[in-house]
């Protein structure tokens, strides 16, 4: 599906809804951490955007596309999984982050990606 105007896309509406949350986060960060680097602020905004978009993203097709073992996922779990994937720099890293957050295996493996207490988790 191609969207002509990005401002009318549902994810853009979600992004606009995230703005007050991001403002609060940035003000809190500035009060507690002092000077805030741009990269940190962008990461914070991306996490909030993922939270607001999560209810509109169907987990099953995303998990299938990323070869993550399928299982029913609650709204809160899915939101946390998308937020966990925000810092990922590759498709494989996104799959690992989501699988780790949901404690499931990547398809073709029998074990969850990370065992509890694993230093990579």
Image (cartoon, rainbow, N blue to C red):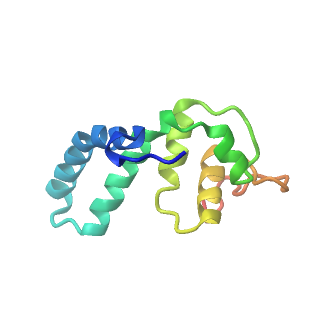
Most foreground residue, 1 or 79: 1
In the drawing, does residue 55 fall left or right of residue 58?
left
Is 70 above or below relative to 116? above
* Residue at 64% in and 33% down: 73
Is 86 above or below relative to 72? below
x and y percentages locating residue 105 in the rendered image: 75, 51
x and y percentages locating residue 56 in the rendered image: 50, 34
Residue 103 in view: no
Q: Which quarter of the rendering shows the C terminus? A: bottom right
Most foreground residue, 112 or 54: 54
Most foreground residue, 11 or 35: 11
* Residue at 71% in and 55% down: 115
**In the current view of this chain or complex, which residue is farthest to the front?**
4
x and y percentages locating residue 24 in the rendered image: 20, 44
Q: Quadrant of residue 97?
A: bottom right
Q: Quadrant of residue 59?
A: top right
In the drawing, does residue 31 fall left or right of residue 18?
left
* Residue at 51% in and 52% down: 84
Q: Which quarter of the rendering shows the N terminus? A: top right
x and y percentages locating residue 63 in the rendered image: 68, 46
Is 103 above or below relative to 77? below
In the drawing, does residue 116 fall left or right of residue 105?
left
Q: How many marks?
A: 0
In the drawing, does residue 27 fall left or right of residue 87?
left
Most foreground residue, 109 or 59: 59
Residue 79 in view: yes
* Residue at 19% in and 49% down: 28
């Amino acid at each position: 599906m191609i969207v002509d105007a990005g401002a009318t896309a549902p994810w853009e509406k979600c992004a606009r809804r995230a703005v007050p949350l991001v403002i609060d986060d940035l003000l809190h960060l500035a009060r507690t951490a002092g000077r805030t680097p741009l990269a940190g602020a962008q990461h914070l905004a991306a996490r909030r955007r993922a939270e607001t978009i999560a209810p509109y993203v169907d987990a099953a097709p995303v998990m299938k596309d990323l070869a993550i073992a399928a299982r029913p996922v609650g709204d809160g779990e899915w939101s946390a999984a998308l937020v966990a994937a925000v810092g990922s720099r590759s498709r494989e890293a996104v799959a690992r982050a989501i699988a780790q957050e949901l404690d499931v295996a990547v398809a073709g493996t029998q074990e969850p990606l990370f065992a509890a207490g694993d230093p990579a988790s």
